[in-house]
Every structure is written in structure tokens, then in C-alpha cells.
Amino acid sequence: MINPVIQRELFSILRTRKALAMLVAMSVAFSLIVLLRWPTDGRVDLSGMRSQQVFRVFSYTLLAGVLFVVPAFPAVSFIQEKNKGTLALLLNSPLSSASIFNGKLIGSLLFALLLLLTSLPAAAACYAMGGIDLYSQLGLLYVVLLTCIVQYTTLALLISTFVQSTDAAVRMTYAAVFAFGILGTGPYYLLQGETGLLSLIAWWLRAASPLTVVMDLVGHGDVGSLALMTEGSTLAEYLLLSIVSSLAFVAFTISRLNHRLFDRAKSKGKVTDDRQVMARGFRRLFFLVDPQRRKSGIPFYANPIMVKEFRTRKFGRIHWLLRLVAVCAVMSLLLTFAATTGVVDWGVKTIGGFMVLLQIILVVLITPSLASGLISAERESGGWELLRMTPMSPMKIVRGKLLSVIWTVGLILLATVPGYVVMIYIQPAMWLQVYMVMICLVLAAIYTVCVAAAVGSFFQRTATATTTCYIVLIVLFLGPLLIWMGRDAPFSHDTVEAALSINPTGAALSIIEAPGFEIYELVPGAWWVSGILALAALICLGCQVWRISRPV
């Protein structure tokens, strides 16, 4: 007997416009990658160099699609059932917890397989061009991607059982994908060549990332090795870790699928001002910002919508922001310390490039979760109608919401300033480069906030708005870097320069003279493009707010 949850899960995904858009976008992207380098004359490239160039861009694009598209649907699977009240019905049905989970898992995997099938024509074209081995390259690529799909789908389903809202599920899932899939490779490059427990842990974190295996398959395994002896492929270790982790995620998720999911005891809490005098003095001495202290009234000069956003959004509260700022500041100082003390032989410019990428990743990861729901969350909860009945104009409402996000993102950018200050202290001649890099990062933050807010305003569901914002921003920021990886083959210098001008990331990397970016002249062109796109996004946001604010 076929599990009924499989059909229900798969059809519910396929009926959404988002799924159709993803399938079409992936098909068009893979086709364009091959067509850009398909031979137009009767000569054949016997060396296979052209097909290898296309295969590299194709592999990275396919990996990006797997990492950032596939987990979006299973991430909200259980929390949507819970919010709709159907999860309790499923748990009371004759189906066991394992059957329910298997139905969810298989339904999500079938949609992921559809995404992979859209890449088969492009893969066949790469193979037809010659120079690519069917088993050791193309076949292993799909084995790695299938394993990656299973791993991150089970992880997304596990996260879906812990969160209380769909947008939180999407946010935490993408954070986990960034951490395990991309950021996990960072400690190895900082500690390579060293011995000890930390170096061993860093090596296994690198082995757990699918990016490392794909780089080995396309011939980029020695990138960042600092001329050290290559340690070989981590394919076997990655397959082992992904299989073991997937089984652990499956077992843990099935154990949680019971009625205890609905029994969440909440602490009644205790306000600091209601404690004894000694306790209040102790907390005010050791807490810069006390989250349990009673908040003061809203001053007359503050935008009440901005204050409301800070006080009702958990992540927007100041004690969480200070913790995030502290972590970012420590990371930037550690990177600068590693470069200036000779822990790694990269130089200040390379470390500066890593700091730029760190800031951009943080902005792209955090901004959609804050800005995408500014309008959609109010429309979904019915709060937008209440805001319309207040004396405040729609412009003041939107301004307060945007300011709440801009302050948050601004604090994240300021957190890495100490690293740049140390960099200038070590090399005073770099002050102008650092100044221009900071301009690029400020533009990147404004650009990201405007685009995320504009995209999110067109949706009535917060989860859909958040997922779409993540995909749009990942395409805008990661797409140019994928084109940069194919520089000179298959993409020309002018094409790469035009792609890097879409957002300020490439301009910041070229200013800091990061390896591979120093040959591109992106300033001030990238600044103008970013400013125009941000202004266009603000205009779209204003038009959408005006439309939904009109009397019905």
C-alpha cells in the first residue's frame, strides 16, 4: 500500500507557483551555461578544455541549487501542519510516526529529484563535448548531490519540529546550510599545516562539506592550499558523514513526532524590577542590557513602529544584537591576528577579502529574515488593518519598519570594524582601501534591505516571502561569483566585470585586492548600479504599500 502522505506532500509542493518558478529557472540556467560555450563551428576541442570549463560552472550552479532551493520546502513541512492543526490529526491517524516521516521525506525527495532531472540535458551536453569522464566526474557529482539532498532534507525536517513559525524554520534551515555547507570549510584553511586536536576537527569539518568534494571533482581541490601537499579527496569521508548524520536526523525526528510536540511549558518569567534590591544591583552591574528589565515608555522623537518592531521581534532585541556584534567583532579580530602574526601565510589583503565575504554572508543570511516579513507578517496576522486605522501615514509606518532593519544590519557591519582598524594600524597605507571598502559594505547593506523589503511586500505569507527573498538575494550575490569562477572560460573579462557590478561585493573585493579580483575596475560603476537598483526597489516597495493601503 502506498503511503498517502507521499502523494499529499508531493502534490502540495507541485501545486505552488514557487515550485514551478524554481523548475523553470533551474532549467533555463543550466541550458544557458552550456549554450554559452557550445561550439559554433565544425572544429572539435580535442583537449577537452572547453567542456571542463563548462563542467565547472555547471557543477557549482547545480550545487548552489541543491543547497539553497531544496531545503526550502521540507523546512516548513511540519510547522505548517502544526499551525493548520492537521499535525494532530496525522498523529491520531493509524499511521505511525515513522510512516508520517517517511511520507514527508519521500515527497520532498521526489521534488528534489525533479530539480536534478532538469539538469540532465545540460549534463549530457557537457559529456558530449568530450573531456569529461562519465563515472569519475559526472557520475560522482550526482552521487554527491543525491547524498547532499538526503542530508539537508532530513536536517530541514528536524528543524521544522523545533520552531514555532514558518519564517523561523526557513531562517534556521538556511543558517544550518550555510554553516555546514560553506562556513565549515573555513577553519581548515586557517589551520592547515598545523597539528593537534583543533586541526583534526577542522579537517573533519571540511570533509563534511559537499563544496570540498565538488571542488575536487572539478579540479579546484588545491585552491587555498597555500602550496602545501594536497591531502587527497574527501569523498569517502563526506559520504560516511552524510549517511551517518542523515540517519541520526531521521531517528531524532521520528522520536519527536508525538503529542509532546504540543506540550510546551512556558516559564512565567520574572521582571528584574520586581526582584530584591541586591538582585537588581547585581544584574545592573553585570548586564549591559538586561532583557528582563521593564522597558521605558516610547519617547516623543522615536518612531513608534520602529520601537514596536524591536520589542516584538525576538532577534531584534538589543541583547541578542549585542551578542551577535560581539561574535562578529571577535571573528574579525581573529582573522586579522592570524594574518599579522604569521599563523597563516595569506597576507593582509587575502584576510581582508575573507572579512568582506564574512560580512556579506552575515548580511545576506540575516537581512531576509528581518526585512522580508515587514509587510507580509502584518498582512498575514491581520495587523496591517490595525496599522491603517492609526493616525500614522503609510510612509511613517514603512519608515519605522525599515529603520528597525537598518539599525540591526548596521550594527552587524560595525562589528567587524575593529579588524579593519587593526589592519590599518599594521599597514597605514591601506586606509584609503579600507575607507572605500566600508562604502561598498554600507551600500551592500542598503541594497540588501531595500531588495528584501520590496520582494517580501508582494506576498501575504511570511514563509513564502522569506524563502523568495533568500533565493533572490542568493542569486544576486552568488550568481556573479559563479560567473567569476568561469572567468576567461567560458565568460570573457567584460562579462565577468558586468556581472560583478550587479552588487557591491565584487567592488569591495577588487578594492581590497583579493586574489582574482584585482584585475577588475568596478568602482564607481558598481556603486551607481547598486544605488539605482536600491532606489528601484524602494519605489516598488512604495507602490506596493500605496496599493494595499487604499480603501477596499
Image: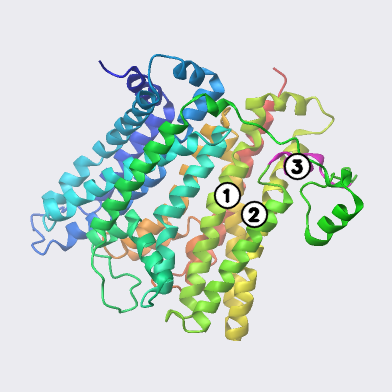
- Please state, as top left, top right, bottom left or bottom right, where the N terminus lies in the image: top left
Q: Is residue 73 visible?
A: no
Q: Nearer the viewer, residue 11 or 356?
A: 11
Q: Which percent across, then down, holds residue 183?
A: 44, 59
The magenta segment is 301-313
Name the disc covering residue 409, or none: 2
Q: CA distance from mark 1 to mark 2?
A: 8 Å
Q: Taking 350 as reference, is 383 above or below it?
A: above
- Please state, as top left, top right, bottom left or bottom right, where the C terminus lies in the image: top right
Badge 2 or badge 3: first in the primary sequence: 3
Q: Which residue is mark 1?
A: 366
Badge 3 or badge 1: first in the primary sequence: 3
Q: Amino acid at mark 2?
A: Val
Q: Which residue is mark 3?
A: 311
Q: Nearer the viewer, residue 205 or 59?
A: 205
- Judged left or right of residue 492, residue 457 is right
Residue appearing at x 82%, y 28% in the figure: 390
Mark 2 vs mark 3, foreground winner is: 3
Q: Secondary structure at mark 1?
A: helix
Q: Which percent across, then down, holds residue 420?
A: 60, 74
- Judged left or right of residue 28, residue 72 is right
Give the color scheme: rainbow, by chain, secondary structure or one colour. rainbow
Residue 460 covered by magenta stretch: no
- Judged left or right of residue 49, residue 455 is right
